[in-house]
Image (spheres, coloured by chain):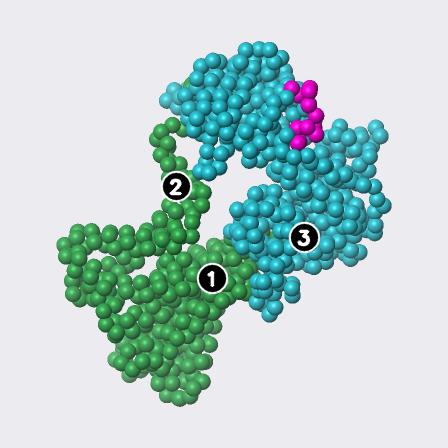
Chain colours: A cyan, B green
Amino acid sequence: MTGGEVVLRLEKITKRFGDLVANDEVTLELRRGELLALLGENGAGKTTLMNILFGHYTADSGQVSVFGRPLPPGQPRAAIEAGIGMVHQHFALANNLSVLENVIAGTESILRPRSDRAHARAKLAGIAERFGLTVDPDARVGELSVGERQRVEILKALYRDARILILDEPTAVLTHQEAERLYRTLRGMAAKGLSLIFISHKLHEVLAAADRVTVLRGGKVVAERPAAGTSRDELAELMIGRRVARPVRDQRAPGPVVMTADGVDVVGGGVKRLSGISFTLRAGETLGIIGVAGNGQAFLGELVSGLARPGAGRFELLGEAVTAPGPRRFVAAGVGRVPEDRNANGAVAEMTVWENAVLERIRERRFSVAGLVKRAAGRAFARTVVERFDVRGGGPDTPIRLLSGGNMQKLILGRSLETAPRILIAAQPTRGLDEGAVVAIHAEILAARRAGTAVLLISEDLDEILELADRVQAIVKGRLSPDIPIEEADPRRLGLMMAGLWNETTDAA
Amino acid sequence: MWVKVEPRQEASRRVIYATPVLAVGLTVLSGYFLFLFLGLAPAKTLYHFLISPTLTFYGWSELCVKAGPLVLIASGLAIGFRANVWNIGAEGQLTLGAVGAGGVALAFWGESGLWILPLMCLAGILGGMLYAAIPAFLKTRYEVSEILTSLMLTYVATLALGILVYGPWRDPMGFNFPQTRMFSDSALLPLILDGTRMHLGILVTLAVAVAAWMMMARTVIGFQIKVVGLAPAAARFAGFSRNRTVWFSLLLSGGLAGLAGTFEIAGPIGQLVPHLTPGYGFTAIIVAFLGRLHPLGIIASGFLMAISYNGGEIAQVEDRLPQAATGVFQGMLLFYLLACDFLSRYRIRLAATRREASPS
């Protein structure tokens, strides 16, 4: 597939933001019918490059040409007219409009007396048929699944006659099955002569789906490899710039039970958010809760963090029934908590590193006496956490918003682990983090487990669950599946469980 | 044409402290043209408005008298504002505080004793707190916006005061004027400098401003207020109660407003009258923001606002400037301050083409 004509050529693109060189003489070629993966950590310059290509930014130097013709810089319209389409990670769809209306929105002048729906419908049907992107054109977008919405986004680009398609982290919100289906679709589109670039930091996807991989690091192209001629380890090393030893989970016998739920309901806003969930968490083991986003993970996280009151059923923490929970009570009992949304819940952006380090414990005697904050003790604690957990980007008095996502997360995890908690709640602990930070966070979670901490890992990331968990349960529409040992879990079976089909999987097993 | 509002990368500390200065400058500039259009000599009027109040020692003492209640109220409000609790009704809490303190003064009229003033202060603080408790209850129990309730209750308070001074509390020897008796000496604040109107309350106010700073910078409750105000979700996750913060902020700001009311009637006024202040409770909102919600800044901006009151009076006499000019000045100042704040955090861009526009 790589022998076709060059359809897109980026030549020596350089873009600076102040002192930061986001793209440094990046040269890239895309051929007709090719599926190219652009791989790189957060901040490697992938998004900047695509924004230059799409005309949202203007490059300081360098040239973009499409089908052999130079593209005028800084004009999104020119990029669209030249046949470039972009599918963003966050969809830009109107939920209360139909698929067809979403696709044609913006393509017609608002001065036209009426829109030519019949023509649009026929064109859309033709595209959907040709590329196998089946979606009901009259369905309301708000009622579609995430995978279907993504198809609508792709259709939007194709409807505008895109021949080069760029997808930014297209599988971030998809289940394993949906992701596989997407890549089948993309391969089909490439086979029919479209050219595609997808941005990713997931190594196994890149290897499975792409023809060719371009690795960006620090704004530079550091390698180009045919997907068939490289390996996961090599790509990881290229992407991070050093050899990474992936932490390995060792076998060990779990200890006593520290947290149990037996038929617990959680009601929020008058609606039952969790119904009849049951799980058992033991010291020195990791229980993974896998699920597609929005299936009740947030409420499960609130329950086990002491924020939500258990309704029906029995919820026990360290052998005692929890009837009046509270974050402070849970923290005092030895529950370390990493919240799902680190920016909203985990940290106060405008406050300093040390203030965030003591956030949950300011009322403990080590950090305040008679209502007065012991600032020196707080700073010392922060310094310890920063050192032990390798938090980079600032000292105790740096505002935490200046830290990168990975370093902020290390601090949030570290402030809990530094107190040797009996239980660690880790909700989406590596979401949005780059590979280097992911490895560091995973290593710390494994170390905590080895030290006897019970870990409850709530995650949407299959790889993360497979790497860290001892047992897995799936969360679907506020219900929990029975648990299976990790040895019996594979992406296919977990995918079925995440779709709510755990009865079938147990029958099959 | 397409107007876009984009957040700026980083508002530096210097910009944060420069905006009040810029706002003051723009207000003075606008004032120049305002006076010009009013047919006055702008330079002379501005001189009377802004400089004259500061030329004599007595002028400064009068600025202290005016700045006192503003700083006292603003110190309380600023703490609430930090917690995202928007108490707009300090004027009403001041009025109810004055009613409480005035009630004590009238009940013990003619008696003397050192205990009368402290008891008045206590009653004043309680009056302000009780009145602020209404919005606090409605907010924490029913999620009613404290902005609306506290503001509307102000008018209720003014009317309640009117009922008292036109009715049961009217001075029997007062020729039917709507005012109470002049308080006895024991119910009046001692002066701290002879020949001026500067009273003990001004020293208390200074102490309160310093205590407020200590509280925000060094205590757990100050920490809690900052967390709840800056990141409500993180506060909840960490176990800081929003409702308790709302109660605390409203009771504190209400109590301080009540104390300010007490100082007014036990100080410069000496009795209860239908209109106790030229809107200190509202002006204090401007003082709090102009002072960057910081106690030292609040003291400085309190003096600036005091200048606008006293300068307004001088210009009224000297240049026949309408009384409303003071209000216009204060309003312009808040407007420019908010505008400068906004522009220091966001930039406005006019884009010729829409993003992702496409041919039809």
Badge 2 amino acid: Arg
Please give the label number shown on residue A416: 3
Which mark's residue is nearer the viewer, 3 or 1? Answer: 3
Most frequent secondary structure within the magenta stretch: helix
Residue B173 spot, x, y in % from top left: 28, 83
Query: Where does the magenta region start and end?
Result: A226-237
Residues at marks 3 and 2 on the same chain: no
Name the residue carrying label 2: B347
For marks 2 and 1, the one nearer the N-term is 1
Chain ID of residue with mark 1: B
Residue A41 spot, x, y in % from top left: 60, 34
Please give the label number shown on residue B268: none
Label 3 crowd (10 A; few <14 / some 14-19 / many >=20): many
Residues at marks 2 and 1 on the same chain: yes
Q: Is residue A309 left or right of residue B41?
A: right
Label 1 crowd (10 A; few <14 / some 14-19 / many >=20): many
Q: Secondary structure at mark 3?
A: helix
CB-based contact (under 8 Å), mark 3 and mark 1: no
A233 in the magenta segment: yes
Residues at marks 3 and 1 on the same chain: no
Name the residue carrying label 1: B79
Label 2 crowd (10 A; few <14 / some 14-19 / many >=20): few
* Of residues A286 and B152, the one drawn nearer to the viewer in this rendering: A286
Chain ID of residue with mark 2: B
CB-based contact (under 8 Å), mark 2 and mark 1: no
